[in-house]
Amino acid sequence: MSDWLHDPDGFAAMMPEGFEVGVSTAAFQIEGAVREDGRGPSTWDTFMAEPGRILDGSDASVATDHYHRYPEDVALMRELGVDSYRFSLAWPRIQPEGSGPRNKAGIAFYDRLLDELLAAGIRPMATLFHWDMPEPLQHKGGWMTRDTAPRFADFAAIAGEAFGDRIDKWVTINEPATVTLYGYGLGIHAPGATLMFDALLAGHHQLLGHGLAVQALRSVGVSGGIGITNVHSPVEPATNNFAAKQYAKVFDLVHNRIYADPVLLGQYPKFPFLARKEFRALTEVNADDLKIISQPLDFYGLNYYMPHRVAAGTPTDNATPDGVSANGMEDLPFHLAEWPEFESTGFGWPIAPEYFGVMLREFAELYSEKAPPLYITEGGASFNDVVAPDGTIDDSDRVNYLADHMAEAFTGASGIDVRGYYVWTLMDNWEWASGFGERFGLVHVDFATQKRTPKTSFRWLQKVLSARA
Ligand code: BGC
């Protein structure tokens, strides 16, 4: 990319008027304070305590200590100049048992956070489920149990009653695809189940929970808009042979379409005959469920990180894109192929902004008539950021990543209404099964001292945002 694009003034001038820029986080990755003020245990508390689950053996019991340092973090966002902040409400903090009474101290924390955000002129976008399920519900099967969907709607109503006057946008569920694939299919995220294709029912129950939560939020009269977020990835076959093309189709279904189609079109996509057994659970669902799942939405949230390339043949090892091994991968008849033509992030993910454009165009083709406005609710990259002797952190590679991807959101897709882009993430955090090993932040965090230091990418975005006026 040429320099004028990355030059903050030139970049700001390209941004459509009213385009919303925000930063995104998730409760469990930043809050810490897992045993404070009546918070109940979550599936991730249990999972991270099991030996061998987290790559660096760390846990998120302190994380970035955001629970206590939120005023400093909001001050950083104000300095950055973002329009909006996407964060998640921890279900076990607000309703520790996952059903029954609410926890006043948990609600009070988010009241304080919301007050701080509004005083800083930052519009709050809140996610109801970013993966930290109350452990008592997991004992009953978690998302494999249909009854978790109405429990989630009850939680949505509690949150709606408590915060509905101040939250600008609600995201019901973050990335049901990741929860299904990593949490219930491959077992590399909580709750660590290895159900392979049988996990797809957990996906359906999340969508049902989403639909019921939308109804619950509307019935308590929240003033903000309501949507869902999924992670989309364009999928291509590694070769032109029949098998690679079929498996690429299957991967596209399990990653993208079995979530977006029911929500936006009110139906599951057609499943390939060769994989009919794998998708059976989804062909037998109740038609009334699909009516609930396809509630009209005010926006659709889309996370984009990378494309996927699928090749026929069993994987040579059990490694997943997150660097964690998953038993069971060796039973799959396909594997994810490399992208040698692209540079990669710290995680080894291909840096391919043009595929973000491909994805937006595919999305437009499939859904533009039915889809509400789109927000890119996450996008960003981990890099091996180095603190220089003078204390600065030059992450120009992240500036490039963000500039190239944000520009694609403005200009890459004709016929689709992209209203905003939320950078993942405000500050380095606890990156799930990778622990503290992958840094995605605009702000560097020294995990020993909790010192926050804005990186070059923070300063770049700050200049872009101030140049907009
Ligand atoms: C998740 C984040 C995560 C990020 C980077 C997204 O799938 O929503 O919680 O940290 O990817 O892996």
Image: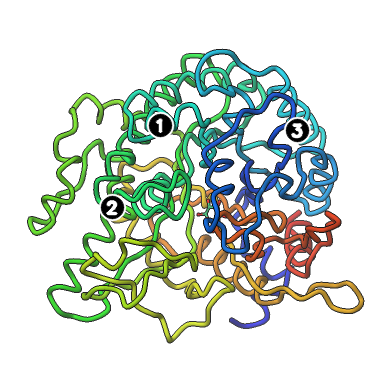
Question: First in sequence: mark 2 or mark 1?
Answer: 2
Amino acid type at mark 3: Leu
Instruction: Out of 348 and 56, give the one closest to the viewer.
Output: 56
Residue drawn at (31%, 61%), measured in percent from left and top? Answer: 328
Instruction: Out of 181 and 256, give the one closest to the viewer.
Output: 181
Give the x, y percent position of residue 202.
Answer: 33, 39
Residue annotated with mark 2: 196
Residue drawn at (48%, 54%), measured in percent from left and top? Answer: 303
Give the x, y percent position of residue 7.
Answer: 72, 74
Question: Mark 2–mark 1 contact, CB under 8 Å?
Answer: no
Amino acid type at mark 2: Met
Question: First in sequence: mark 3 or mark 2?
Answer: 3
Residue 68, above or below 468: above
Question: Mark 3–mark 2 contact, CB under 8 Å?
Answer: no
Residue drawn at (64%, 48%), measured in percent from left and top? Answer: 29
Rate crowding at label 2 as few (under 14), some (14 to 19) or many (20 or more) other CA atoms within 10 Å: some
Q: Tell me the mark number nearer the camera, choosing from 3 and 2.
A: 2
The image quadrant where one finds ligand 1 is bottom right
Give the Cα separation between the discs numbered 2 and 1. Answer: 22 Å
Give the x, y percent position of residue 103.
Answer: 66, 18
Position of the N terminus by quadrant:
bottom right
Toward the front, the furthest residue is 51
Rate crowding at label 1 as few (under 14), some (14 to 19) or many (20 or more) other CA atoms within 10 Å: many
Give the Cα separation between the discs numbered 3 and 2. Answer: 39 Å
Give the x, y percent position of residue 177.
Answer: 38, 49
* Callout 1 secondary element: helix
* Callout 3 secondary element: helix
The label number, if any, that marks residue 113 in the structure image: 3
Q: Is residue 308 left or right of residue 163?
A: left
Question: First in sequence: mark 1 or mark 3?
Answer: 3
Residue annotated with mark 1: 210
Amino acid type at mark 1: His
